[in-house]
Image (cartoon, rainbow, N blue to C red):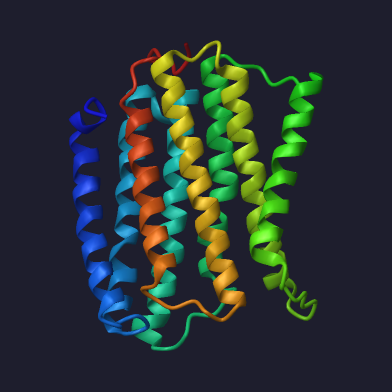
Amino acid sequence: MLTVLRSGFIRTVIFCYVLLVGFWFWIYTTGNTDAQPSYIFGTIYPFLAIAGGVAALTYSKRWGGWKSVMGKGIIFLGLGLFGEAFGQFVWSYYNLIVQDVAPYPSIADIGYFSIIPFYSIAMLKFARASGARFSLQDYLNKIQVVIIPIVMLVLSYVFFLRDYELDLSAPIKTFLDFGYPMGEAVMISIAILTFTLSRKFLGGVMKAKILYIIFAFIVQYVTDYTFLYKVNAETYVNGGIVDLMYATSFAIMAIGIAMIGEGSMYNKEGTV
């Protein structure tokens, strides 16, 4: 923990996050949800994602940027955060400028949904950088790739979708309602598989960092599904617990990018 806090970027992210939590607590306890202060909060906290995205572009240069596998992996994590920020800024545009309830689905979902391909590609790049080789011929690997998404989807159904009413007249909404959890379940499965296949090549320090990224993915998954649940149950409010969860997930991923980017396991070519 003390090693992590040596990073000026990580300390800055933590400091800004603490300030945001204080602002959110005031909004929540004073009944200012779905009011101007909550809209301002929704406009401010995506800058944690912007900071993480910029940090990813900066750290990737240490590994050769687009010219190295490791550099590409870091960049794709950053692109995921940029996508998240785009989605939230669109959401805030509806609240502050249009002054109407942001629709779901909307163009914001282009940004939100982008994390699924971007984060999945990032983990595949990290696996390649570490020297791991995917072999779906291996029976255990097949089981893991299939079982993890199924378990996550079952849990999602038990906790969130039991009362879900399928509406085929809204195909995009239905696709996103199921696409978010399924896509993120696959994303997490790829991350865990990457860790499993590359554990012999990753040093002890790097293993902890990859596990942290997996944790960041899980936090993102729980956050997105909580949002979907509350929207479908018509209990979502701006400035509520979901917004705090999103701010938290952005901060966690930004810190994870710094932890990966400031690692020293790889050579300049981005390989072991």
Q: Position of residue 47 (x, y in %)?
A: 30, 57
* Nearer to me, 120 or 72: 120
Quadrant, the N terminus:
top left
Vertical side of 223 occupied by 169: above or below: below
Q: At 44% across and 34% down in the image, what residue appears? A: 212
Q: At 38% across and 29% down in the image, what residue appears? A: 260
Q: Position of residue 101 (x, y in %)?
A: 47, 85
Q: At 40% across and 44% down in the image, what residue appears? A: 253
| Observer able to see residue 85 | yes
Which of the 4 quarters of the picture holds residue 146?
top right
Position of 202 with respect to 247 (left or right) is right
Q: Position of residue 181 (x, y in %)?
A: 65, 55
* Nearer to me, 133 or 237: 237
Question: How many callouts does the rendering have?
Answer: 0
Which of the 4 quarters of the picture holds residue 106?
bottom right
Q: Position of residue 190 (x, y in %)?
A: 63, 34
| Observer able to see residue 53 | no
Position of 145 with respect to 71 (left or right) is right
Position of 269 with respect to 168 (left or right) is left
Query: Which residue lies most toward the bottom here?
Result: 99
Q: At 55% across and 52% down in the image, what residue appears? A: 221
